[in-house]
Amino acid sequence: MLHKRNPQLNAHGELIHLLSIEGLPRDVVTHILDTAGTFLSVNDREVKKVPLLRGKSVFNLFFENSTRTRTTFEIAAKRLSADVINLDIAKSSASKGESLLDTIANLSAMHADMFVVRHSESGAPYLIAQHCAPHVHVVNAGDGRHAHPTQGLLDMYTIRHFKKDFTQLSVAIVGDIVHSRVARSDIHALTTLGVPDIRAVGPKTLVPGDLKGMGVRVCHDMAEGIRGADVVIMLRLQNERMSGAMLPSAGEFFKNYGLTDDKLALAKPDAIVMHPGPINRGVEIDSAVADGAHSVILPQVTFGIAVRMAVMSIIAGNEA
Amino acid sequence: MSTLTLDAEALYTELRQGVQALWRPGMALMGIWSGGAWLAERLAADLPQLGRPGVISSTLHRDDFGSRGMAGATDATKIPYAVDGTHILLLDDVLYTGRTTRAVLNELFDFGRPASVTLAVLVDRGGRELPIQPAFAAAKVSLPAAQKLALARGEDGRFTFSIQG
């Protein structure tokens, strides 16, 4: 039987699309992080722009709203000198009944070189990658509950920046894990990079049962979950994804799983606190922690631009 | 196999003399990653009056990005002095088509407007595809296009040339 090739990689094992961290070899992930380091220093220059994507058109296709992620992709593409076209698809073609693949065919006819795709359906970026022209590259900017690979990579960049080595770390991911594509991408990335202790912390209703198979320890007790952790990744309580009575109340959630200074004291003294944003103060994280000495939430945002520059420049330089 | 042999250490001695002749007060050294950066580092060690050298990479401005991609050097440019208004003495191991020099000049200008840029190289192998000429070359050689000439640095810091292809 033929082994099905990872659709993100070409025959030489080089990255041509970024769809998920799952299945990416460690050296590909490390290469992205190393390249991001190069781009971080571009911000210190007089001219904060490099010409790698000059003459290329990057289309931001956001079938689901996200001002922040779209903006960071836009900044990243512009720092690489690409032309950026933002399409608020949710309000245009899709609402007129055009199919996803017809939309892609139309945009390809406008000579797109790269699609940055966010979609509420898991797998939509894969479908686009399979049907676009060979010279077109696709970046998944979040699909359903499935994956948010650039967030996962920027989280890894942040951890490496502050902790240097992955192979001795304890990482706790806390909160609404069942709805979180960030959590899934983080878990795949942490596993790929050799983190020995990954914990998923949250109430039974918000932590999926299949995590144990991914090498993750599930903790329903917050104290147990963050004790001795080097890294605490807080997730946003996704009210807009909440259906049914999964939680008694936001106040109850904060009492049990909200990160306060008292709870953080259980982690290592030099632990870092991360959050993909936007944060809900007083719901999953206390203001004192979000603004405190352990918080690296704002550096995450800065690193996110460099990581997205790295991803876009690497895939654009590789041929299908 | 090529019969050409290049004594990199002897050429380095000539380059050092050439750099001393080109040197003017207020100049700053800049080595092109990687071979040129080794030369700049050794020159700065041998001649402390040259000051701390900068390292500059062509990666972000290469004209073959479309075919070569981001593979290879991801080392960032590191410049320990202000570029604006400075006379830069740029060093490279091998000057060939001039495309690396062009990319490096673009990279340099991203950091400011240098007062001037002077190029000194260990070996000029001809074959220029752009109007770029060095102010000093320790040797001029002619090699078939298929052959690759590269500087190597041993653990003891000594230079050798390798010719491949």
Image: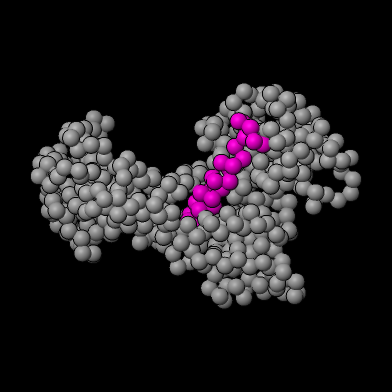
What coloring was used for the rendering? one colour
Where's residue B19, x and y in %? 14, 44
Which image quarter: residue A112?
Answer: bottom right
Where's residue A90, x and y in %? 72, 66
Residue drawn at point x = 70 percent, y = 73 percent? A93
Left or right, B135 with reference to A75: left
Residue drawn at point x = 77 percent, y = 47 percent? A238
Q: Nearer the viewer, residue A85 or B162?
A: A85
Q: Nearer the viewer, residue A227 or A250?
A: A250
Which image quarter: residue A237?
Answer: top right
Which image quarter: residue A104?
Answer: bottom right
**Residue A306 highlighted magenta (yes or no):** yes
**Residue A236 highlighted magenta (yes or no):** no
- Residue range (magenta): A290-319
Left or right, A159 with reference to B22: right
- Please tell me whether the stretch drawn in magenta is mainly helix, strand or loop: helix
Q: Nearer the viewer, residue A129 or B90?
A: B90
Where's residue A304, x and y in %? 56, 48
Where's residue A279, x and y in %? 70, 44
Residue drawn at point x = 54 percent, y = 45 percent? A303
Query: Number of labelled discs?
Result: 0
